[in-house]
Image (tube, rainbow, N blue to C red):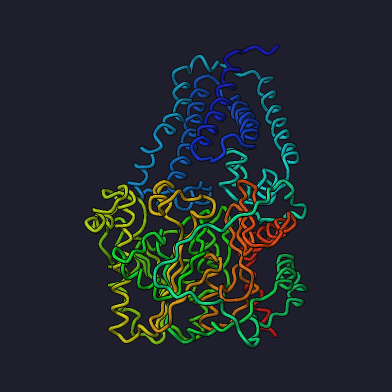
Amino acid sequence: MIKGKKNLLLWLFFFAQFLWSELVLRAFASENFFGIGLLYIFLYSVVCSAVVFSFLGIFRGKKRRIIGGIVTVLTMLVYESQVVYFYIFHTYYTFFSAAANGGKFLQFFYALIDAIFKSGLYFLALMIPPAIFFVFIKKLTSKNIRLALCWLAVATAVVFHMAAYGCLFITGNEPLSPYDLYFNTSEIAMSFDRLGLAASMRLDLKRLITGFSEKTDENMDMSSIEIVTGDTLSEEVPEKINEEAPVESSEPLGDNVLEIDFDKLIEDGNSTVSELSEYFKTIEPTSKNEMTGLFEGKNLIFIVAESFSQYVIDKDLTPTLYKMQTEGMTFTNFYNPIWGVSTSDGEYVALTGLIPKSGVWSLYRSSKNELPFVLGNSLAELGYTCNAYHNNDYTYYNRNISHPNLGYNFIGCGNGLTMKNTWPRSDYDMVDITTDLFINDEPFHTYYLTVSGHLNYTFEGNAMATKNRALVADLPYSSAVKAYLSANIELDRAMELLLERLEESGKLDDTVIVITADHYPYGLKASEISELAGHDVETNFELYRNTLIVYNSATEPRTVTKSCSTLDILPTVLNLFGIEYDSRLLMGTDIFSDTDPLVLFVNRSWITGDAMYNSKTKTMTITSGLILDKDYALSISETVSKKFSVSAQILDSDYYRAVMESMEQD
């Protein structure tokens, strides 16, 4: 019999802290508290407590109390920081993000304070274990920890880790199952939900150190899904938009492809290049169509607008955005999925047509890669002057490194853009300052990344909300919703000024303006977004539904009802401008092509022209008159999984460079 009740109490204490912290975080963030994740939380809480206890066995007496106290407080801070981060961004931070941008997170001071205050009960609950430790520190720690007990702790950690490992094979290998998340897929939010924070952060650190590329499970199982028949999500088409038939060509116009010798690349000798080339060789390209080259030679202004949504477009409140939507191309089934690194990943998808790799900053990681299809590089090759502007710190997310590689002369606050230092800064002022820098170039391409619509949505902590407060005072919404709309009025004023400057210079008819969002307004709660929608918003699909605006004053209005997403923007714009590219090498497709739509989300849910699959509920809803079975669901899910893994491999291997070098040699 092992002696030392205090030692056992200390071990039990750390087990209780890990288990309690996991449960508090789960209660705060998970939509399904009583899920499979509880099993892994229990098993890994035993593992973590055993590891900590055996580690403390190295120290004696007072040192053990001090180290034990430090471990207890650090554990509390990790879980509390994840609660705060999740409250603000609706996802969790990774080791990469914490190391690369942790200090700059303090920029969001008001958001931090608000998050701590709003998550107060959970925040305080996580303080209970440290409080217990320091109150009963002498009763929890003895002078020595017997060596036999330390070895027992080590053995327990090994046994329970192996038990958790074994459970992975028992609980199934469906998409985003614990097995899939552990071996194949890097999706931080679902991993936290189904494996717990401790296990997920260990995996994240391991993958960051050793490298990790997603894999498509050849034995993926979809047998447990439910198939139902239903309608697509309800939609409201803006007023006065002429519905036009899908674009069809009477004669074949060819495909959007380049002359790539995939066989030569397969024999390249690089295993990743060979594997990717084998895959792309099988992909059907998209066809050119009557929209191909519609805007050839015109100027292009591409805008990724912070937290922009269809809800800010109003005939009276934001008349310029309303004009651009109703008189341009508008897409009523457009989705703006959120990814792991909020704005940076939103930019990456819109600008590269690739899916971000989880756990890293994909846009920054791409800064050393060849990116031949992005708009900056593509249009620069055609003689365009390409500039990019951002009304926030130019080094945030290392954009000073990534954006020049996209083909832009990048200017932000700190390297040439001098603006009034408010939070957030004014989109109107950015446009006012920058238009003279490019408007006389012929032709030009300008990229704007805006910030006026950024959280926090209060009139105390958001300078743009305060600036336009009087314009929303009488609206029938809560304070946060009013602040959000007020902040986005600044974007509308910026667009009004931009159109005025283009018209004054005689460039309006020769300029195309594309507006998309980086992500949905996650600074608003679901209930507040529901206020704007006028009904309870469905949170797996509808929450990410948005609008894409493509505006040219010389082009007739057009409404597009085909399902599409941010991934489809780049190939669509490339086709509209008649730019040569290879449609097989991008993860999205030209919206105007006859290719079947595929909208995919970070949790591996998806939408096609015939069905919608909800990975959370494991339900496929048929939205067409076709009879579809589980094989269809499996096929689409495998396609989605492959697109995630291929995107990561393109990023990690610099695949486009190999392609371009191969073409140059021919």
519 lies above or below 111: below
Q: In which quadrant is the N terminus drawn? A: top right
Mark yes or no: residue 409 visible: no
Direction from residue 384 to residue 192 in the image, left or right: right
Direction from residue 208 to residue 271 in the image, left or right: right
Answer with the quarter of the image where residue 251 lies.
bottom right
User: Which residue is nearer to you in this view: 443 or 146?
Assistant: 443
Which residue is at 51% across, 83% downward?
A: 381
Q: Residue furthest front?
A: 625
User: Which residue is nearer to you in this view: 382 or 156?
Assistant: 382
Tell me where residue 254 appears, x and y as whole percent: 65, 85
All told, the count of numbered labels is 0
Tell me where residue 20 appears, x and y as whole percent: 53, 28
Tell me where residue 603 appears, x and y as whole percent: 59, 52
Direction from residue 569 to residue 650 in the image, left or right: right
585 lies above or below 163: below
User: Which residue is nearer to you in this view: 135 or 54?
Assistant: 135
Which residue is at 61% across, 17% downward?
A: 8
Answer with the quarter of the image where residue 168 lies.
top right
230 lies above or below 151: below
Q: In which quadrant is the C terminus drawn? A: bottom right
Which residue is at 53% across, 72% downward?
A: 570
Answer with the quarter of the image where residue 430 lies.
bottom left
Which residue is at 39% across, 87% downward?
A: 442
Mark yes or no: residue 485 visible: yes
